[in-house]
Image: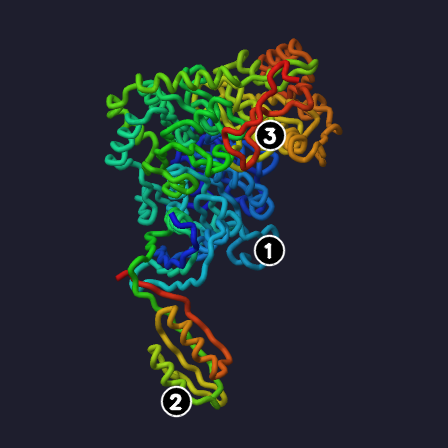
Amino acid sequence: MQISGAQMVIEAFIAEGVDTVFGYPGGAIMNVYDEIYKQDKFQHILNRHEQASVHAAEGYSKASGKVGVAMITSGPGFTNAVTGLADAYMDSIPLVVISGQVPMSLIGTDAFQEIDAVGISRSCTKHNYLVTDAKDLPRVLKEAFYIARSGRPGPVHVDIPKDVTAQIAEFDYEIELDLETYKPHTKGNPRQIKKAIEAIAAAKRPLFYLGGGIINANAAYEVREFVQKTGIPAVETFMARGVLSHDDELLIGMLGMHGSYASNMAMSETDLVIGLGVRFDDRVTGKLSEFAKNADVIHVDIDPASISKLVNADYPIVGDVKNVVTDMLEQVGKIDSENYESWRETIINFNELHPLTFHEDTDRIKPQWVVKRVGELLGDSANISTDVGQHQMWTGQFYPFTRPRQFISSSGLGTMGFGFPAAIGVKAASPEKTSINFTGDGSILMNVQELMTAVEKKIPVINIILNNNFLGMVRQWQTLFYDKRHAETDLSVQPDFVKLAEAFGGIGYRVKTKEEFDAALKDAVEKNVVAFIEVIVERMENVMPMVPSGGSLFNMMLLEKKGDK
Amino acid sequence: MTEENQRRVVSVIVINEASVLSRITDLFSGRGYNITSLTVAPIPESKYSRLTIVTAGSVRVIEQITKQLHKLIPVLRVYEHEDMVEKEMAMIKLPITENLSDINTLCEAYNGKIVNAGESTIIAMVADEPKRIDNFLNAIKRYNPKEIVRSGAVALER
């Protein structure tokens, strides 16, 4: 059929099963918005900033497993969205982001709201396109969705000049894609898999190192089975929280800079790392030369460039982790769980020596208590997102996650301002669950305008602001490594968060006691409208344990034991 | 695994489309890899172009470069050359007052000759292995070259 470029965008969304688009209109994208106005197949959520649109699409994608879609205009609309693209790129989140561009005749003339969008997005997307003819649009859009969700997922950016959205051309979305140069390798090499199984069977202290790739591959339940059948202990990255349930006896905890003592010691003592969907990030490994020093490494990943990038893999397996683990399960009989009994005991001892905990020794509420308490009260019934900073690490440490896609956070890029819009996307994708965003008094202000989005669209995200009047994580580093010179991190001058929420039409609570907190959370869940629960927490609390940047995993700063002082 | 910086020649076959060269060079600059030289031209009667990139890095870095190049969507193939024939061309502008027969003889030793003569200058060209081009450029110094242009290396696996 002959339709306009703008109509093609709509038709492609419908063909792809898109039910929610996040975005913000503007001059160059108006033709497409005109077609959005005319249709009723999907909803459009108007964020109040383009960065938030992309974060919301990320939250939507992470919660649903589908490709997230955002739409923005040219120039500042696009540049505002760049942080979101970079965030999705770092965390391998499948997105299609459509931006308007000035008409073809004006490209290169420094026209109003013109910027070289594909030039900017090239280094922070999996792929991008500048569409110069409407006849290319069906293929480009179909490729964009395919590239975003296949292989190692990631954001794809499609920049469309305004005249191309008006141009009439043939639309056929049934075309076969011919991507000769892009063929992701999804099936693991059987010989390598066999060798890996033999290595596991021969190991004395093997350790699963589980990463976010497992969630991307929808492989959590296969991995759970693999862990159960082998009896091998497991550590999770921050990205992998929820792959195993928090009460799984073989789950040691989170590893890395703020990982538990037992997790980091297990990684330091293991003789075989079984890395699944991981990328050996510096926040996980600490000092590379000391990382899992005595271990061989099995590394399963869809991205060949992740393998042996930082840590040499003795058993590299390129493939989709779901396929590979399924293949491994067929040979799981070769592995005798009994062999690891003493190793499991060693880990129990690590845990008893320095359990992951905190001290309730101040009048003010401890932030960790809030996270734990939400876990007790809401547990599995909530999806959890976070912003970036101390509250993020405490959530990773203390929330009792029970399932994959329950936890959504900005891990690789570490984007303050991610949590609230992401939680809006999560709630749009998963309305039956309570959507909680743990945030800080610093982060929440970085996309606070999303109160308006949530009020307008009746998206009842509950933001729990752990308020310590500090830019807490930076303050912690200043305290520990900069001789307590707290440069520009004291956030004592603050808005009235309760009034701020109310000014937009949401509800606000300020709580100072545990009883008040319980009551506020209960009330917010019942009221079902966007909420700020500001919790006045202990100001100087540090996230512990901590591996100082560049230090070895086994050299942790630990929580002082009670009575040490 | 050696950590020493080694000179490596990498050939990349890419779809000949808009901005594909930027994707390659952005990858090098963004990840802090070196480009010593880069040549690119379409492959006849195909939709592809071939790039020859001379780079330097440790074994691990070179492995990353080839893997990262592979990840780019329009990249069809990456050859990290081990056993190759490698050639480079150079053109040199020299004063016409220099000893032209000596220059011509020197050029002939490097598969070249004087290819143009003007009012006050001549242009000579040579084509040889990059290392030999270095030697030639050293030898030609005594004839007071005014301008030198090197093409960058091209390579074919044997």
Asked whether A534 or A484 is in front, the reply is A484
Left or right of A367, for residue B45: left
What SS does tag 3 mark? Answer: loop
Tell me the quarter of the picture where residue B85 sits. Answer: bottom left
Which residue is at a point 51% across and 41% down the rendered structure image? A85
Which residue corresponds to mark 1? A111
Q: Measure how far apart labels 3 and 1 are at the Cα level.
A: 39 Å
Query: Quadrant where the C terminus of chain A lies?
Result: top right
On the question of residue A216 being in view, the answer is yes
Q: Is label 1 on the same chain as label 2?
A: no
Q: Residues within 10 Å of mark 1 (few under 14, many from 20)?
A: few
Relative to residue A196, is residue A514 depicted above or below?
above
Q: Is label 2 on the same chain as label 3?
A: no
Subunit of label 1: A
Query: Residue B101: which numbered mark, if any?
Result: 2
Which residue corresponds to mark 3? A389
